[in-house]
């Protein structure tokens, strides 16, 4: 695997680089295709007392991405690798359950695990993520973005769907991790 490691507000030391490569290398056991051509983009950030790690591994028909913020850079790296491993297991489980491991599909990129890895538990939370537990219907009231943000805050939600009063399009406002707000609108 090719590693593209960069740091923001941080000099990436050889020890840190080796640690990232060693941890990400354990993910290669899940891939059937040669990983020499596979690139992992790693971004290490230091902001105040927080250490943030972002890892992106683009694959055909799938984008593996995880990020974590922690007080310790090495702990953040471990947590990100755990998240990526759960994503891979989740996709493998979904593929195997639906029988999509056919040629040309995403299934050909993952190994059928044998040995200790095969006995590792598939997390129940991964299956629960796919289960639809509630359907909610409501009328979209035309409003502007500011009113939608106020409604979202009043309800205590992290997102709010509304009809834009000017365009009539269905938009979504959401609260970002940094506490600010984002807007999703159709093209």
Image: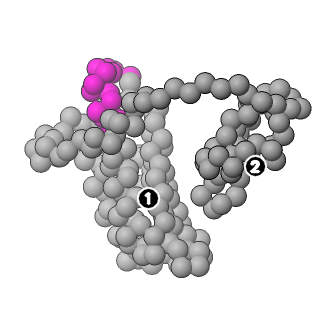
Query: Is disc 2 surrounded by few (<14), some (14 to 19) or many (20+) residues within 10 Å?
Result: few
* Vertical position of residue 68 compared to residue 97: above or below: below
Location of residue 18 by image quarter: bottom left
Residue 96 position in % (x across, y down):
27, 27
Element carrying mark 2 = helix
Could you tell me how far apart the alpha carbons at marks 1 and 2 are, in whole angstroms?
43 Å
Residue 3 is marked as 1
Q: Nearer the viewer, mark 1 or mark 2?
A: 2
Determine which residue is flagged by label 2: 150
Give left or right: position of 30 versus 84.
left
Q: Residue at x 55, y 70 (%)?
A: 45
* Vertical position of residue 68 compared to residue 124: above or below: below
Residue 50 position in % (x across, y down):
52, 74
Range drawn in magenta: 89-104
Residue 122 in sight here: yes
Location of residue 21 by image quarter: bottom left
Counting residues from the start of the chain, the first of labels 1 and 2 encountered is 1
Q: Residue at x 67, y 40 (%)?
A: 160
Give left or right: position of 60 versus 33.
right
Q: Residue at x 20, y 44 (%)?
A: 121
* Vertical position of residue 30 compared to residue 20: above or below: above
* Vertical position of residue 177 compared to residue 29: above or below: below
């Amino acid at each position: 695997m090719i590693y593209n490691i960069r740091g923001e507000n941080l000099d990436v030391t050889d020890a840190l680089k080796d640690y990232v490569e060693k941890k990400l290398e354990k993910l290669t056991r899940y891939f059937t295709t040669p990983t020499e051509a596979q690139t992992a983009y790693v971004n290490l950030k230091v902001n105040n007392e927080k250490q943030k790690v972002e890892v992106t591994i683009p694959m055909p028909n799938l984008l593996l991405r995880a990020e974590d913020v922690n007080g310790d850079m090495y702990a953040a790296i471990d947590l990100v690798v755990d998240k990526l491993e759960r994503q891979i297991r989740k996709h493998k489980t979904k593929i195997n359950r639906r029988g999509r491991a056919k040629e040309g599909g995403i299934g050909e990129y993952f190994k059928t695990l044998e040995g200790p890895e095969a006995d590792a538990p598939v997390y129940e939370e991964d299956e629960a993520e796919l289960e639809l537990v509630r359907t909610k219907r409501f009328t979209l009231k035309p409003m502007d973005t500011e009113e939608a943000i106020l409604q979202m805050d009043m309800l205590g939600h992290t997102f709010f769907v509304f009809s834009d009063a000017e365009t009539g399009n269905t938009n979504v406002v959401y609260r970002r991790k940094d506490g600010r707000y984002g807007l999703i609108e159709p093209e």
